[in-house]
Image (cartoon, helix red, strand yellow):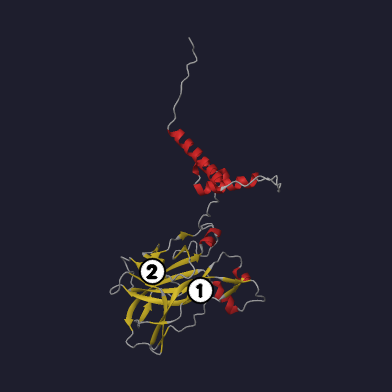
Amino acid sequence: MAILKGMWASIAVDGKSLVEYDEDASETSDTLGSSNTIVKYVEATSGAHFKIEFGWNLPDPEGCEGLCHYVNLDGKNMDSAVSHFKYDASKSYLDSVRACVSGQWTREKFRFAEIVSDDGQSGSMRSSEASDIAGIGKIVLSVCRIKNIQESTTAPTRFNLQARSTVPAKIPEKALKGRALSHKTSLDPPEKTAAIRTYIVDYVDKRDSPYVNFEFRYRSRRALQIEGIIPRSPSPVPLEDRPVESLTREEALELLARRNAQNKPETKGEGSVRPRVKRERDAEVDEILASSYVRKKARGNQVIEVIDLLDD
């Protein structure tokens, strides 16, 4: 989990926190060196629901009574949660956008989705489209300290109805600008949910200058490798270059097939060499594996024979 100033956060899928990778310190980034922002990379899986888990351990609240957590997905504000130090547990999560229309509450769950690029789009993008695309690949949890927390006495009939334009279904290839982006976030269709409590608070930290920012940059495993966040998978050693004793039976079969292909005569007709039957091929494989076994055994049980060259 990412930890900063007595607070922590993580991205979880199927009840398990995703493995986090550190940002490359050699990169040029506006977040590097920032005392209130921590950046982590995580691996995204297409179609997986996710939630943002968070908590705190503040021995000295510094004049505040609680915290407000704001979730921003791909550059768009989604939802928030208020936590009162006196009454609430020291950890919580957000996994959906909650809204209220005419007294009916709904939720739309967070999900990862694969980016579909479009090479055929031409012309310049509208400013709104460029804005929708600018924040792709980031989940940001901003935390502000709050005080004078009062629960609303009147149940809201409208709540969290600001425009939440999502990333377009298809993104122009040129808009990605060569970035190794693979996924975006999406929202499930609305489903009914129970009403939530709403609060009136005073802010210790300004909304545009939060106490802590947790920034999670999500990518496919391949994209993380391209960006150098995680090492690339090593190339397999060719069978021809591997010790025979390390080969499995299937690998020995493959190696034999390659040798046969290389030694196959080019002439055809009556004079061509008859194909070997399966028994002959299996015998060769057994011979390869047997020779491997003999070498292994010989190394472990070497017998030194001494020959007396002095003949009376």
Q: Residue furthest left?
A: 86
Mark 2 or mark 1: whose residue is earlier in sequence: 2
Of badges 2 and 1, the one in the foreground is 2
Q: Is residue 35 above or below residue 257?
A: below
Q: Is residue 147 above or below residue 105?
A: above
Kind of residue at badge 2? Glu
Rendered location of residue 112, percent (x, y): 48, 70
Residue at x 46%, y 23% (from the top left corner): 305
In-front residue for pair 161/278: 278
In the picture, measured across the screen, residue 132 lies left or right of residue 49, that is right
**Tag 2: Cα neighbours inside 10 Å, few (<14), some, or many (≥20)?**
some
Label 2 element class: strand
Q: Is residue 51 visible?
A: yes
The disc label shown at residue 75, or none: 1
Distance in Å between CA atoms under marks 2 and 1: 19 Å
The disc label shown at residue 123, or none: none
In-front residue for pair 184/275: 275
The disc label shown at residue 53, or none: 2
Label 1 element class: loop
